Image (cartoon, rainbow, N blue to C red):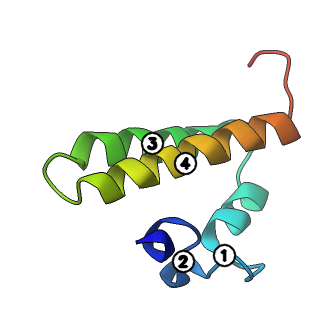
Amino acid sequence: MKEAVDHPAHYGGGDNPYEVIKVLENWLTREEFIGALKFNIIKYQARARLKAGSQDYEKSAWYSAYLADFLKRNPHDQD
């Protein structure tokens, strides 16, 4: 299940510099990227009960951790 959550191959994989999340982090504004991460956190929480259960909760947690790390790496006065 870890591969389905942590840098899955279908999104480019963790070693790929063109992994989707890395590309989005560079293409989007700071605010847009934060919004994208929040969207995924909420999406996986909302659908977990009806779809993939624990895997969706793990994905939500992964995006939450990524958001926390992103905010540490990109501080802003209004966070």
Density class for disc 4 (Cα within 10 Å; few <14, some 14-19, many ≥20) is many
The x, y position of residue 57, in whole percent, is: 36, 48
Tell me which numbered mark, 4 or 2, is placed earlier along the sequence.
2
Side of 61 relative to 26 (left or right): left
Q: Using the image as rendered, state which of residue 51 and residue 3 is in the foreground.
A: 3
In 3D space, how far apart are the residues under numbered discs 2 and 3 (Cα atoms)? 17 Å
- Mark 2 or mark 1, earlier in chain: 2
Label 2 – label 1 distance at C-alpha: 6 Å
Residue of label 2: 11
Observer able to see residue 33: no
Residue 59, horizontal then vertical, whole percent: 44, 54
Mark 4 or mark 3: name the one nearer the start of the chain. 3
Mark closest to the chain's N terminus, 1 or 4: 1
Vertical position of residue 47 compared to residue 1: above or below: above
The numbered mark, 3 or 1, whose residue comes first in the sequence reads 1
* Amino acid type for the residue under numbered disc 1: Glu
Q: Which residue is mark 3?
A: 41
Q: Nearer the viewer, mark 1 or mark 4?
A: 4
Q: Secondary structure at mark 2?
A: helix
Question: Could you tell me how far apart the alpha carbons at marks 3 and 1 are, in whole angstroms?
Answer: 19 Å
Cα distance in 3D space between marks 4 and 2: 14 Å
Residue at x 86% of width, y 41% of height: 73
* Contact check, label 4 and label 3, Cβ < 8 Å: yes
